[in-house]
Image (tube, rainbow, N blue to C red):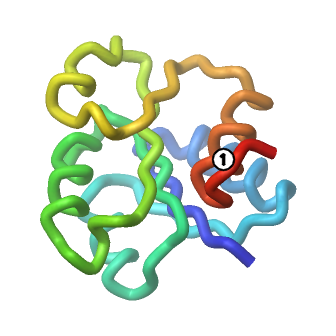
């Protein structure tokens, strides 16, 4: 079973995404900010990190930087989500896929499948 780490400070969205991904057959870990995400990843390496951009303590861009700087997590796929325009992420992390909030659930699931399994469904 593939594991997805969902990182978001909005509890309702975090729970909704966890339920959605569980229903899709994924094992789900959750964190409410980038620092918690790094702690979870130190315990268990997920197959994908699905992270919000704007969060307290450590935001998504800093989380991406920390993951890419650590050889143990550098190759973990990341999907960044935000209501903020993707232009800034493209300059700082052009290799990281982005999904705009609000997003279509089917599109999100499709992107997760593609990143976890390496090919479109």
Q: Residue at x 24, y 62 (%)?
A: 67
Q: Residue at x 36, y 39 (%)?
A: 96
Q: Quadrant of the C terminus?
A: top right
- Position above or below: 58 against 53: below
Q: Residue at x 39, y 76 (%)?
A: 40
Give the mark count.
Answer: 1
Label 1 SS: helix
- Position above or below: 33 against 35: above
Q: Quadrant of the N terminus?
A: bottom right
- Position above or below: 98 against 39: above
- Given residues 46 and 9, the one toward you in this image is 46
Q: Position of residue 9 (x, y in %)?
A: 41, 44
- Given residues 58 and 49, the one toward you in this image is 49
Q: Is residue 5 left or right of residue 24?
A: left
Residue position for label 1: 114
Indicate the quadrant where residue 34 lies.
Answer: bottom left
Crowd tier of the residue under label 1, counting other residues whose Cα lies within 10 Å: few below 14, some 14–19, many 20 or above: few
Q: Position of residue 36 (x, y in %)?
A: 32, 66
Q: Residue at x 73, y 43 (%)?
A: 120
- Given residues 116 and 57, the one toward you in this image is 116
Indicate the quadrant where residue 105 lies.
Answer: top right
Q: Position of residue 44 (x, y in %)?
A: 45, 84
Q: Is residue 111 left or right of residue 74?
A: right
């Amino acid at each position: 079973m593939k594991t997805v780490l969902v990182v978001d400070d909005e509890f309702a969205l975090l729970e909704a995404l966890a339920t959605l991904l569980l229903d899709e057959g994924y094992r789900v870990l959750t964190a409410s900010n980038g620092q918690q995400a790094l702690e979870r990843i130190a315990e268990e390496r997920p197959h994908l990190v699905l992270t919000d951009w704007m969060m307290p303590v450590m935001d998504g861009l800093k989380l991406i930087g920390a993951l890419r700087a650590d050889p143990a997590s550098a190759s973990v796929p990341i999907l960044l989500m935000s209501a903020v325009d993707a232009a800034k992420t493209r300059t700082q992390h052009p290799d990281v896929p982005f999904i705009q909030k609000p997003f279509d659930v089917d599109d999100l699931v499709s992107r997760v499948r593609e990143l976890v399994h390496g090919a479109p469904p």
